């Protein structure tokens, strides 16, 4: 079955509208998680950290604990139901955001961020839900849509938080934005529970004399998929933390608005071209992934030498091409790996390696910046 076939309330396949509902719920639930961390330096002085020196560490606290908890939550989803655990993740985020919004000390705020990491995991939970109901191209397109939700939230959430700041502080916005995952949970409650057991792998067509099945691309082992996830997240996230200082250093006089647009460009590339890339590389994801890593390497190198706005825009667009190729082709490989496997455990473990790559990238970027400046990453 495909993602566009509505099959009734108890069927394992999802309609297009239901897939979009899952992606939309992830988008709204991600607003606080992605939009508020850039404002930690404004939040912490009110909690006793006058210089905001703990902002860098607290930035990765939810990521660390989210990665540690993801495999366990994934296995529980396979055992007790993907919808149930997806609802748990959304409600867990709502509870954590309320705690963060009303925290009155650095210790309680840190505890709330730890709680956010442990109780969250909406991305892995959403992917596990989709993986139980879809397979093949329908699943890879749904995963591509999920990444689009993440990119859109990453672009729009900080802007919305900044626009609300004159009326309500970023700290209290945690409590306000808790209504978003709560609303997402209410919407998800109306969706069906997908199959509780993985679909057995279908018999593959006979391979030709080159050893490759005519209808499928070469398979990728789970270990290789996990390694690719870590490497890809590391190579992209390493450029995030110190991009604004790099822009200010290499293009003096750049306004904050223009710096924000430059930061968003790669993610906008994904939103514009992801589904075209999916169609172009559906049967050759490894080629697309290799091209993606190549574009990322060239884009990162170009950041270090770009000393004018047009050159920097070109570097960001090159990085955006690599980001899009990589994310889409990794989704294609994930859909292939999910066939015949329990999706909760697989996507939970995948989230662990993704978070590990992000944390390693943040630490490497911090060390490089300390030793060589913002151009090091």
Image (spheres, helix red, strand yellow):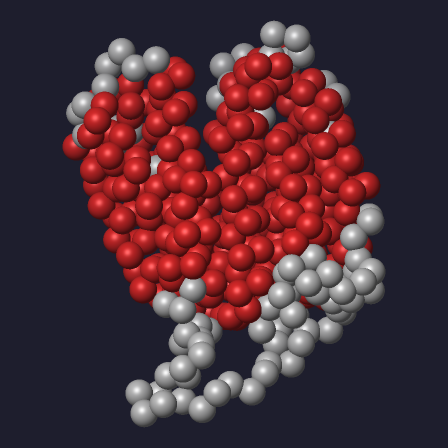
Q: Is residue 39 above or below residue 362?
A: above
- Quadrant containing the N terminus in the rendered view: bottom right
Q: Residue at x 69, y 18 (%)?
A: 172
Query: Can you see residue 373?
Result: yes
Q: Residue at x 32, y 92 (%)?
A: 209
Query: Can you see residue 108?
Result: no
Q: Is residue 52 above or below residue 62?
A: above
Answer with the quarter of the image where residue 113 lies. top right
Left or right, 43 with respect to 284, comes to right
Left or right, 230 with respect to 107, comes to left
Residue 230 vs residue 159, the one in the foreground: 159
- Quadrant containing the C terminus in the rendered view: top left
Q: Is residue 251 above or below residue 34?
A: above
> How far across and down, in percent of the image, does residue 212 sit?
37, 83
What number of labels is visible?
0
Q: Is residue 232 above or below residue 306?
A: below
Q: Residue at x 29, y 23 (%)?
A: 247
Left or right, 158 with respect to 250, comes to right
Q: Residue furthest front?
A: 5
Q: Residue furthest top?
A: 166
> How far across and down, in percent of the image, does residue 159 sit?
53, 21
Left or right, 251 with respect to 140, comes to left
Q: Residue at x 42, y 36 (%)?
A: 268
> How far across and down, in percent of the image, does residue 201 sit?
60, 81
């Amino acid at each position: 079955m495909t993602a566009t076939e509505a099959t009734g309330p108890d069927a394992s396949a999802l309609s297009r509208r239901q897939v979009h509902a899952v992606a939309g719920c992830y988008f709204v639930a991600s607003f606080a998680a992605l939009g508020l961390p850039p404002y930690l330096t404004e939040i912490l002085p009110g909690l006793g950290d006058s210089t905001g020196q703990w902002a860098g560490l607290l930035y990765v606290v939810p990521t660390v604990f989210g990665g540690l908890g993801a495999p366990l939550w994934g296995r529980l989803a396979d055992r007790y139901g993907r919808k149930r655990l997806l609802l748990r993740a959304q409600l867990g985020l709502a509870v954590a955001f309320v705690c963060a919004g009303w925290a009155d000390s650095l210790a309680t705020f840190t505890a709330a961020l730890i709680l956010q990491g442990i109780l969250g995991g909406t991305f892995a939970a959403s992917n596990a839900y989709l993986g139980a109901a879809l397979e093949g191209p329908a699943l890879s397109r749904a995963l591509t849509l999920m990444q689009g939700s993440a990119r859109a939230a990453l672009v729009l959430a900080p802007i919305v938080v900044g626009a609300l700041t004159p009326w309500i502080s970023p700290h209290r916005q945690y409590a306000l934005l808790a209504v978003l995952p709560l609303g997402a949970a209410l919407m998800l409650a109306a969706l069906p529970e997908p199959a509780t057991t993985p679909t057995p792998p279908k018999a593959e067509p006979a391979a030709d004399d080159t050893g490759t099945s005519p209808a499928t691309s070469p398979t990728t082992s789970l270990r290789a998929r996990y390694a690719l996830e870590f490497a890809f997240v590391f190579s992209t996230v390493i450029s995030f933390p110190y991009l604004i200082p790099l822009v200010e250093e290499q293009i003096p006089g750049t306004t904050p608005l223009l710096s924000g647009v430059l930061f968003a460009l790669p993610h906008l590339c994904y939103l514009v071209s992801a589904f075209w890339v999916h169609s172009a590389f559906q049967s050759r994801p490894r080629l697309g992934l290799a091209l993606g890593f190549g574009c990322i390497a060239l884009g990162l190198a170009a950041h270090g030498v770009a000393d004018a706005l047009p050159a920097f825009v070109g570097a960001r667009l090159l990085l955006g091409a690599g980001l899009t190729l990589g994310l889409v082709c990794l989704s294609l490989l994930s859909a292939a790996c999910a066939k015949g496997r329990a999706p909760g455990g697989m996507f939970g473990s995948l989230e662990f390696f993704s978070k590990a790559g992000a944390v390693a990238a943040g630490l490497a970027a911090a060390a490089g910046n300390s030793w060589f400046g913002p151009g090091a990453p």
